[in-house]
Amino acid sequence: MRISYEWLGDFVDLDGVTPKDAADVLTRQGVEVESLTMVDLSAIVIGKVLDQQKHPKSRNDLWIHQVDLGGRVQQIIAGAPNAVVGSLVPVALPGTTVPNGKVVKDMNIAGYKASGMLCSAAELLLGDDHAGILVLDRGTPGQPLTTVIPSQAVMEAEVTSNRPDCMGHLGIARELAAGLDRPMKRDFMPAFTGTADPAGREMVNVGIEDPDLCGRYIGGVITGVTVGPSPDWMQRRLRAAGVRPINNIVDITNYVLLEYAQPLHAFDLAKLEGPAIEVRRARGKEKLLGLDGVERELTAEMLVIADARKPVALAGVIGGEETAVTEATADILLESATFSGPSVRQTSRALGLRTEASARFERALPPELALAGARRAASLIAEIAGGQVHRDWADVYPRPQEPVRVNIRPALIDDVLGTHVPLEEAEAILKRLSFHVKVRGDGEWDVLPPVFRLDVSIPEDLVEEVGRVYGYDRVPPTLPGRRHDRWTPLAPSLDRRLDEAREVLAGAGFTETWTPALVSSKKLEELRIAAHAMRVANALSDDMDTLRTSLLPSLVDGVALNRDRARDDVRIYEIAAAFLARVGEKNAQPEEPLRLAAVATAGPSGAAGEKAFREMKSVLDGCVASLHAPACTYQRAAAQLFHPGRCAAVVLDGRQLGYLGELHPTVVGGTGRVVAFEIDVEPVLAASRTPRAQPLARYPAVARDLAVVVEETVAAGAVLQAIKESGGELLEQARAFDEYHGAQVPEGHKSIAFTLTFRSPERTLTDAKVDEVMSEIKLGLEKRHRARFRE
Amino acid sequence: MSDAASLTGHALEAIGQAQTEDALAKIELEYLGRRSGLVSTLLSNIGSLRAEEKAALGKAANEAKRAIESALAARRAELEQARLADLAETEAIDVTFPGPPLGRGRIHVLTQTRRQIETVLESLGYQVELGPEVETEWYNFEALNIPAGHPAREDWDSFYFSPELLLRAHTSPVQIRAMQRIKEPPIYIITPGRVYRRDAPEATRLPYFSQVEGLAVDKGLTVGDMKGTLLYMIQSLYGPDRKVRVRPSYFPFTEPSFEFDVSCGICGGMGCKSCRHKGWLEVGGCGMVHPQVLRNGGIDPSLWNGYAWGFGIERMAMLKHDVDDIRMFYEPDLRFLEQF
């Protein structure tokens, strides 16, 4: 909302209140002024032209003026001829900076002295006209220009959606009046009514099809108007508020919209068929040529104003071109109506057409406002465009506005604010905001909000009204605290519990990323992981139309992004939810398993990939161990995104958490390999146990190496499992440290080297005892895996 | 002069001239070696001597041995002392030579920021509550006093999967869920998490971002308590000089409602380029919980009241670390991530 400071002065005395002061008051009270543009006219004085002569020597057309500045006369040269003798003009004297930035100096033009400048509207930033000197209609020579044109200031303010009344200068002025504690100069409801015969309601027939969509429709008739340009002051204010002047009738409807926040429309009465007005939904295939020159096809959801034949306006959004007021118009129908907010919003959205009118109707306007706006506009039309305002307008009002009463225990104000506001002050504030306050016998207040404040309905609303004018700066900050007899013990959040894993990952060189959960459905389909994907119905773009089912594609993109920036060694991870739709359950919220996913780059060779695969296992094992969960096991598996020969299912306590492996070459692209894992973390945290201290070993350990030769197809994990089973209690640890293929082992076989550590809690082990266990282990391996042993 | 005395004299001279441990070891072996050491050979023909001669020779040999041993020890100590005194020269290294890279990964700056916020509020007794990102229309809007057709819905343009299901536009649904679960106040919770709004990506906003909302429900809470809580939080995060200002605003789920601003850290509130000459930086929204919202959470507003607030984690991180483009947080670009 663009606010003209000058305009506010119509409603409240701004003497001694600068535009900055006004902006501060408004912001403090809840109308946030985001910017303030100043046009300072205080240095400009009024002059009266005593003499005007053509410059005798200059080749350009220049005129030499003798200008009376209230007792002294200055010679000023100008390029425009319109400052004729007797004109009152704005003068900038040497040394002055004109609002458009120009600095005025003493000059000598072809032998004639020029002491100052006569200003155009454009130079004063009061309009676009720079061809002629701005000629004033009143003023006293020598006085500042601000005695006839106040300094201009335009504020850009954000009005919250509950305050449609502040979408007009009157509402803003009321806020200012309340904040400054100054009276309003004008009543909300103008007294003006028409007197001409016949009665308006006999000239135009108005019907409302659906009262839910249109709560009130006022149609005023004004005959014999003279359409022409509106006065300068009105044009100036419209421009300041960002509206282009058209003609006096249209300008007046816009002016009242900007003043009262009530949108109005004027039809050329002669062009209306009937003359009848029907407020109804559009019928199949109806069209409307709008004032913006665009023809639109209408749908049955859209509310229109129709004459006896066809739609002539889109209710609350835009008027029709065919019935618009033109220079030839003599009689008008002035529409002031209350259309339903949701209906106007729906139409405006469907057509992608947001107007000053729709922006106001969307916020739900009070029907009482329609009458005030219509009266104000009619009085301005009578004053500016002449014409006869007819008596007794059509006013179809099927949903009369119910008065709202709010009872409040005044102590609630102090209770909620946390500071003491004297009762008289609270009451005075409400009155300044046009609320009626009646103090009842029991001390409670019976409060009647003004008709234009539909947003006030509960006592807390009144607390807010008092608080914002009283000033929240005056409420001292405190911390709450009372004696509680109930509490919830602190429990770390799921995300916080994963910080141990984050530290392991950081230590292993992995950097955490946050990537968007919205991804491309096309990409998920290409990767064949779209089975449980949730598709957004109103996506902003194709690359963000679906919730991800896996974090890995985002991380793979991260690898590519960093490789593009010449980073070869990329180790990144993310902790976030994946989203999996529940099949067959429409409208059910999806599963949102919290995932930990990591990727790391490796060289292009198969061996490099295998090494990286093993390192990745160490990383995942480290993460799981840091969360104090039992160790994971790994089983050969096949999964989307992963290399078919290098993928393991990650299993914890018999439950599959996810996969670890090398990513499929088609997923990775490029030359290098990428290893990855993605697991559900909630089962890991569920398996987490507080570590318990074990007694330190009292007897020494005995280490033995064992090289096991088995067929290529036998998994190291299976061999390890067999060793552990045969090793019994004395086998403290078994670790694989090398794998060998080559001359020393038969074709189709491999040799895996293990280090076995034996220890007894009760005695020092003898070699003989260890030999015995080793024999057991070998026997088991021979039986289970047809293993042989290398010395 | 006896043989022993002359032997000792030679030994002490040699020891005195020895410059290294190796030389001393050689001398030690030469004189004190068990079999062929010169002190031992003094006694080689002791068997042929008379008893009193034996005793005299034995005594002399022992004295020689002790004298040499003590000279050796003294010389060794001297040499060690000299070596230690020379370490600065003999073992000097180039201490300016840089260490090899550690390959340390980073925790995301938004995680760090979120932790800082959580830690500060936990110190006031708030608990972290989490909730689903795909929400129902009821939890996201209706329960928060934003019925269908409400003009304020414009402020939370959302991504829908169906008319019933959408990506949450704020973490406020978690507040409702927490009230329903905890049932009996006092309730002091914060709800960090990702949220989604249908805004085209640009330097200052994204269709996805992260919030921390807070909710306190108790007896007799006030606007002053809300201000104090925000001030404590901001000062803990940004330093004790910061100020907080609340400005009236409008949200359907709070009454009264506010925006809260933090005084600019560069100009201290005087107005500068960084705060666009306002002196204040907008941070988030807050207010006293609307009685209908308490009711929707199953709390009786005649017994309890509350305040709530919300702000973007990204916004807080941008203020703290001078990040000027919100999109950087969601790019997995190590050049950015490794700065924190």
Image (tube, coloured by chain):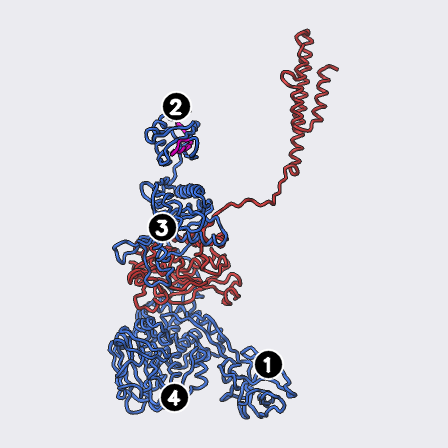
Residue occupying image coordinates x 72% and y 15%: B3
From the viewer's side, name the closer residue of A63 and B67: A63
From the viewer's side, name the closer residue of B102 and A118: B102
Query: Are the residues flagged by discs 2 and 3 in contact, CB closer than 8 Å?
Result: no
Please tell me whether residue A765 belongs to the stretch shown in magenta.
yes
State which quarter of the image contains the N terminus of chain A.
Answer: bottom left
Q: Are marks 4 and 3 on the same chain?
A: yes
Find the magenta span and give its range: A745-770
Q: Which residue is mark 2?
A: A769
Q: Which residue is mark 3?
A: A594
Residue occupying image coordinates x 37% and y 55%: B189
Work out whether mark 4 precedes mark 1 in sequence or the reverse, and give the earlier one: 1
Residue occupying image coordinates x 39% and y 46%: A677
Q: Along the horizontal axis of the image, is B59 left or right of B181?
A: right
The amino acid at mark 4 is: Glu
Chain that the image shows in blue:
A
Tag in front: 4 or 1: 4
Work out whether mark 4 precedes mark 3 in sequence or the reverse, and give the earlier one: 4
Q: Which mark is residue A104?
A: 1
Chain ID, mark 3: A
